[in-house]
Image (cartoon, rainbow, N blue to C red):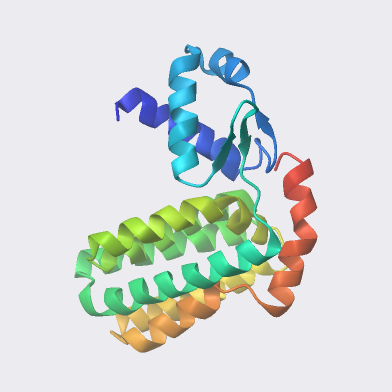
Amino acid sequence: MTTHSATLREQIEEMIAVGELKPGQHLDETELATRFGVSRTPIRETLIQLSSMGLVVIRPRRGAIVAELGPQQLVEMFEVMSELEAVCGRLAARRMTPDEQKSLLAAHQACQAALDAQEPDEYYYKNEIFHEAIYAGSHNQFLIEQTRALYRRLRPYRRLQLRVRNRLANSYHEHDGVVQAILDGDGERAAHLLREHVMIQGQRFSDLMASLPQLRQDAA
């Protein structure tokens, strides 16, 4: 993949993640080509890449739309996500280098700054860096790739979750326990806490379902 096409993919992926391109929205190749100042060919190639990642659905003779996830799919994907992150946390507790532990702490502190400022969007980006630090600390490249791929598919929904009342503070508090477990080298506790942190069930599931219309209708 060329650097230019990778950049294009990242830009469109970001528009999906932040709700600028909403679930179910038709993706007009000509419109996107004009927006990014390219021909339709790289746009078409980018949409095919995003389709392979599950972010876009290409329908024969009807063009591409942003993928929509139903409630059952969301639950199943968060279930798998929680297990992948749990494994990352368990391995990170055993394998993280001192420098990687410092990076994790720095990411955790950046989340606190965003929480103190009550900036959910800023927290969302710092939160990504925090989770990425845990993935990297697992030192298992295959696991990292699988976890990142699913994280990308769930980005719009993870971002939406952070807009639920009190979720920022709760998320940061949960991070705090994960950091302590990893620094203590307690892989089982890190895995348990990450699984609980990512899993959506009960009230959190209800809150996410209630927020979905906002994701589909409003630019975030």
In the rendering, at what x and y percent does residue 198 appear?
53, 71
In depth, the one of 55 and 88 nearer the eye is 55
In depth, the one of 179 and 117 nearer the eye is 179
* In the displayed structure image, the side of residue 170 where residue 104 appears, left or right: left
Above or below, comparing residue 100 to residue 94 in the picture: above
* In the displayed structure image, the side of residue 37 where residue 121 appears, left or right: right
Above or below, comparing residue 113 to residue 4 in the picture: below
Above or below, comparing residue 196 to residue 220 in the picture: below
Of the 4 image quadrants, the one containing the N terminus is top left
In the rendering, at what x and y percent does residue 180 appear?
39, 81
Q: Quadrant of residue 124?
A: bottom right
Of the 4 image quadrants, the one containing the C terminus is top right
Residue depicted at 63% across the width and 35% down the height: 65
Residue depicted at 42% across the width and 62% down the height: 131
Q: Quadrant of residue 72?
A: bottom right
* In the displayed structure image, the side of residue 51 where residue 2 appears, left or right: left
Q: Is residue 188 visible?
A: yes
In the rendering, at what x and y percent does residue 110 appear?
46, 58
Q: How many marks?
A: 0
In the rendering, at what x and y percent does residue 203 appear?
74, 76
Residue depicted at 36% across the width and 23% down the height: 4
Q: Residue reaching furthest front?
A: 60
Q: Is residue 103 visible?
A: no
Residue depicted at 75% across the width and 55% down the height: 212
